[in-house]
Amino acid sequence: MPPKFEFDLQATDGKARTGVISTPRGDIRTPAFMPVGTAATVKAMMPESVRQTGADILLGNTYHLMLRPTAERIANLGGLHKFMNWERPILTDSGGFQVMSLSGLRKMSEEGVTFTSHIDGSKHKLTPERSMEIQKLLGSDIVMCFDECTPYPAEEKVALESMRMSMRWAQRSKDAFGDRPGHALFGIQQGSTFKDQRAESAEKLINVGFDGYAVGGLAVGEGQEMMFDVLNYAPDMLPTDKPRYLMGVGKPDDIVGAVARGIDMMDCVLPSRSGRTGQLFTHRGVVNIKNARHANDPRPLDENCSCPACSNYSRAYLHHVFRSQEMISGMLLTWHNLHYYQELMQNMRDAIAAGTFEQFQKTFHETRAQGDIDPL
């Protein structure tokens, strides 16, 4: 029998959960943060370096990869894992969110979405069946069903029509995915900020049957308070024995709040993008390394961090290479942010297992409220 995709829920503390997702390509410890490798690379990072931060799984982007270099080319070259030199699990999104963001460059129907490439203006069509085909060509370990990410704000009627079309697409995605032992297909709950729509969406997805379930349609402009309001009930509508994935989140306090509400998996471009723009996440909050006050500071960025940027370089050096636009700046600062995120996930896993997650949250917020280190 080939290895299976399985989820072992090992401990809970309140709504917070910790466990292990087993895949043929390795285990994924949850709660898990997935660095984003949009175009088959986490920008400014070698795959080995991403792994050293503690990441168990990466996210790849169907929309970008189907356009360049194309899924067919990647398949001919041995699949996405070999292509990008990452042998551990990969989750690919369905392309729905990126197509939604194209706005005037797309046309939607019951069949799917036709759109114009932002790269060269070529015409393409993305349907549930084509999305499944692309993700199969890529060799994704976790495949996301094709959906429409309902924009925010949306009128109740518009959100309902969008959600129900996504549910029809979910069934088509499941039919097209077929039987693929060792690979998983996740359904995506929609319904915007309407509780009754979230409940209907969850019921329809459960009736179809998926290996995991995502909470979609959040982190699209509704703000943290409203996102948490939805997360107070949306994850509870999904099966307890399956992984729950919150798409596109987020800042460290978003992540802690999401885990406290029952989320197991998250992804976001924020740590890598912020690293390249000089915004660093530390135990005491955000540091902007471009600020002049760091120019003569011999201390590490974060004295509690063991990443290469903090272990081997001063704030003064990091400030210098950032202001000089040296490539090493993006490399070191991205490494630091990804290390911080993975350490945050490990600390949450440990706290949930120990039954001390409430204290962890209190300490997390109190420490960040102190602000950056005191002046010299």
Image (spheres, helix red, strand yellow):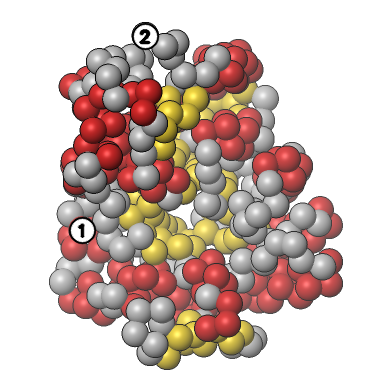
Q: Quadrant of residue 16?
A: top right
245 or 66, nearer to the observer: 66
For the residues bearing labels 1 and 2, Cβ distance under 8 angstroms: no
Q: For mark 1, what is the residue? A: 84
Which mark's residue is nearer the viewer, 1 or 2? 2
Q: CA distance from mark 1 to mark 2?
A: 43 Å
Taking 100 as reference, is 339 left or right?
Answer: left
Q: Position of residue 143 (x, y in %)?
A: 44, 62
Write the residue at 27% across / 19% down: 296
Q: Pick whichever, 44 or 371, lies toward us.
A: 371
Q: Position of residue 150 (x, y in %)?
A: 67, 66
Q: Position of residue 200 (x, y in %)?
A: 78, 61
Q: Amino acid at mark 2?
A: Leu
Circle 1 crowding by C-alpha within 10 Å: few under 14, some 14–19, many from 20:
some
Q: Position of residue 18 (x, y in %)?
A: 51, 30
Q: Is residue 133 in view from this perspective? A: no
Q: Residue at x 52, y 33 (%)?
A: 252
Q: Which mark is residue 376?
A: 2
Residue 202 occupies which quadrant of the picture? bottom right
Q: Earlier in the sequence, mark 1 or mark 2?
A: 1
- Image quarter hosting the C terminus: top left
Is residue 107 in view from this perspective?
A: yes
Query: Quick one: which residue is furthest to the bottom in this view?
Result: 123
Which residue corresponds to the image point at 26% horizontal and 56% vertical from the top-left?
41
Q: Is residue 33 left or right of residue 217?
A: left
